[in-house]
Structure formats: structure tokens, C-alpha cells
């Protein structure tokens, strides 16, 4: 679609931001929806987040995704923040509504949609969550009032314990925190229905690593690894080989992006278009 003086601008801010897949999936979605819009990546230093929000107003940028390391800092420069994003202290989506900047977090809803749309229903299940960082926090919040029990395992127990306490205060849910170790991994996985890896283990830089010993995996387990590059992590490969149900990290990427798209445009996101764009891009990158 040709860019003109009428073209509306969306984007993503972060540092670094060159690796972001948001322009790939969002431009595909905008084009498929026949919207006169474009989506750009903006590298913004931590000291310039406030200026970036001023620029969003000044340039009439309609919406922004916010990636690391700005998800928390951006809260200080918004007019309104959705209650979930405020509780998480993290915003990944900003909408410009007549110069009023509204903040949202779509990571949790993206994870839940990714699970349900791929045949995994967390309600009433025992879930084991690896990690206590930003993505893990968002996932934990959206799962908290759905699952029967949530175990949060993190290398250092303090962030996991703080997250568990925060969830129990808000949802009165059964949540337990553990320091991540082979012993706690094996014990919690023994009767878990769903395993979610929300750590960076398995990413391209350490693609041959996994926290889970293959023999611990079982056919009646569902596994979601939020790492999407590589498309299939070592954990995902091992889980598939064990007969477990596997949900790719690409799915969470797509559905959290779809939620942002719908907040900005008020239109239903073209999921299949976004999925195809993401997979095609990742496959090209992995071959290069």
C-alpha cells in the first residue's frame, strides 16, 4: 500500500528494536485489512521515553507497541493505564486517543488466546510456570483466577515469591513459589497438566538448552514455550517427541499482537495473515 499524507502511523519502541517482529506481523495485518496505515520500529533510549511519548502526541502516531526495556518506564508518561497493566507495572501497548495516551498489557491475554486457540484449556488445571519476569508476570495474572493451582519457579526465589503474594492478594488463588532447581522442576512437573516456559532458555543464542529433562515429559502434558526464535525450541521438540501437546511461542507473539491491533483499530485481527507473515520471516532468518 502506498504511503501518503493521509497514512496513519503505528510503531514499536525499544532498545534494541531491530529484532522486533512487530513491524512484520502488524504491517501484514494492516495491509490485509486494507487500512491506510504503516507500522515502523523506533529505537528509543531509556532516557528518552518521555520525549517519545511527547512525540507520539506531536506526530499523531496512533498506536505503539512497547518492548524492553521500556515497559515499566512508559507508565510515567501515560494519561490512563488499564488496571491489569498497572498491577503488572508493565505496558506493552499504547493507544493515542485524541492526544490522550492509554496504556494496556496484552501479553497475558495473548498467552491465554494462544493456549485456547490451540486446544489447551487451562481452567481447573495445575500449571507450572518457569520464570518471574515481565512476560511470566503477565501470564501468571491471566491464569491466576482460571487454574486450580499455579507453581512459579524462578532461579532466585524472591521475584517468584513476590509475584505469588501479589496474585494471592488479588485473586485468592492457590499459588506457590519455588527456587528453580532440578529437584523442584521434577517434583512439580510430576502432576502438572500444563508447563509454560517464560524464561529466555532456548532462545537462538542458547538454542540447544532446556531446563526440562526429556524423560520428565509425558503424553498427557501440554507445553507452551514463549520463545519464538527458533520456531521450535529444544523443549518443544522434546515435548513433541514425548507425545505432549505443544503450543509454539509464535502463537503467543501473534495473539498478543492481534490484541494490540484490535485495541488500536477496533477491527478483528487477521490471525492467519499474521501467523503466515511471522513464520515466513522466521524461516528466512533461520536459513540465513
Image (tube, helix red, strand yellow):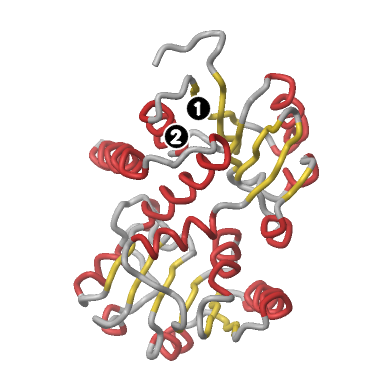
Q: Gap in Å between the C-alphas at discs 1 and 2? A: 7 Å
- Kindly state the secondary structure of the residue where label 1 is placed: strand
Residue at mark 2: 26
Q: Position of residue 131 (x, y in %)?
A: 53, 69
Query: Exactly how many numbered labels are in the figure?
Result: 2
Task: Choose between 192 and 201: the one closer to the eye.
Answer: 192
x then y, percent, for residue 181? 49, 82
Checking the image for residue 107, the label placed there is none
Who comes first in sequence, dot 1 or dot 2? 2
Is 243 placed above or below 142 here? below
In the displayed structure image, the side of residue 188 where residue 98 appears, left or right: right
1 and 2 marks in contact (CB < 8 Å)? yes
Q: Is residue 288 left or right of residue 78?
A: left
| Quadrant holding the N terminus | top left
Judge whether 14 appears above or below 255 on screen.
Answer: above
The residue tagged 1 is 39
- The answer to whether residue 208 is visible is no
Considering depth in this image, is 282 or 267 the residue closer to the camera? 267
Q: Quadrant of the C terminus?
A: top left
Looking at this view, name the residue that lies furthest to the top.
5
**Quarter of the figure with residue 74:** top right
Residue at 74% x, 49% y is 81
Work out whether residue 179 can be spotted: yes
Q: Where does the image place residue 218, in percent across and percent down from the top left?
A: 27, 83
The reply, left or right, for residue 79 in relation to residue 65 is right
Find residue 31 and report its image quarter: top left
Q: Is residue 31 above or below residue 223?
A: above
Q: For the residue carrying disc 2, how many other residues have a C-alpha within 10 Å: few (<14), some (14-19), or many (20+)?
A: many
* SS under mark 2: helix
How would you rate the neighbour count of disc 1 (Cα within 10 Å): few for under 14, some for 14-19, many for 20 or more?
A: many
Residue occupying the point 48% across, 45% down = 257
Amino acid at each position: 500500500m502506498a504511503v501518503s499524507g493521509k497514512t496513519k502511523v503505528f510503531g514499536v519502541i525499544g532498545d534494541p528494536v531491530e529484532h522486533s517482529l512487530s513491524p512484520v506481523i502488524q504491517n501484514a495485518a494492516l495491509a490485509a485489512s486494507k487500512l491506510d496505515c504503516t507500522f515502523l520500529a523506533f529505537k528509543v533510549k531509556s532516557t528518552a521515553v518521555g520525549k517519545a511519548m511527547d512525540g507520539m502526541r506531536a506526530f499523531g502516531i496512533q498506536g505503539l507497541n512497547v518492548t524492553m526495556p521500556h515497559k515499566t518506564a512508559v507508565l510515567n508518561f501515560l494519561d490512563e493505564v488499564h488496571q491489569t497493566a498497572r498491577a503488572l507495572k508493565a505496558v506493552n501497548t499504547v493507544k493515542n486517543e485524541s492526544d490522550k495516551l492509554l496504556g494496556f498489557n496484552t501479553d497475558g491475554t495473548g498467552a491465554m488466546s494462544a493456549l485456547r486457540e490451540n486446544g489447551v484449556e487451562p481452567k481447573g488445571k495445575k500449571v507450572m510456570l518457569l520464570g518471574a519476569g515481565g512476560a511470566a508476570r503477565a501470564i501468571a495474572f491471566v491464569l491466576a483466577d482460571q487454574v486450580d493451582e499455579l507453581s512459579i519457579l524462578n532461579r532466585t526465589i524472591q521475584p517468584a515469591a513476590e509475584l505469588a503474594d501479589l496474585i494471592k492478594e488479588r485473586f485468592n488463588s492457590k499459588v506457590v513459589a519455588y527456587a528453580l532447581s532440578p529437584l523442584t522442576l521434577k517434583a512439580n512437573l510430576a502432576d502438572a497438566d500444563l508447563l509454560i516456559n517464560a524464561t529466555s532458555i532456548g532462545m537462538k543464542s542458547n538454542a540447544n538448552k532446556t531446563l526440562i529433562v526429556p524423560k520428565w515429559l509425558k503424553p498427557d502434558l501440554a507445553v507452551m514455550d514463549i520463545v519464538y526464535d527458533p520456531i521450535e525450541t529444544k523443549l518443544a521438540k522434546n515435548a513433541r517427541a514425548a507425545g505432549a501437546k505443544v503450543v509454539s511461542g509464535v502463537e503467543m507473539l501473534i495473539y498478543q499482537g492481534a490484541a494490540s491491533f484490535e485495541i488500536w483499530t477496533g477491527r478483528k485481527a487477521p490471525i492467519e495473515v499474521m501467523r503466515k507473515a511471522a513464520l515466513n520471516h522466521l524461516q528466512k532468518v533461520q536459513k540465513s
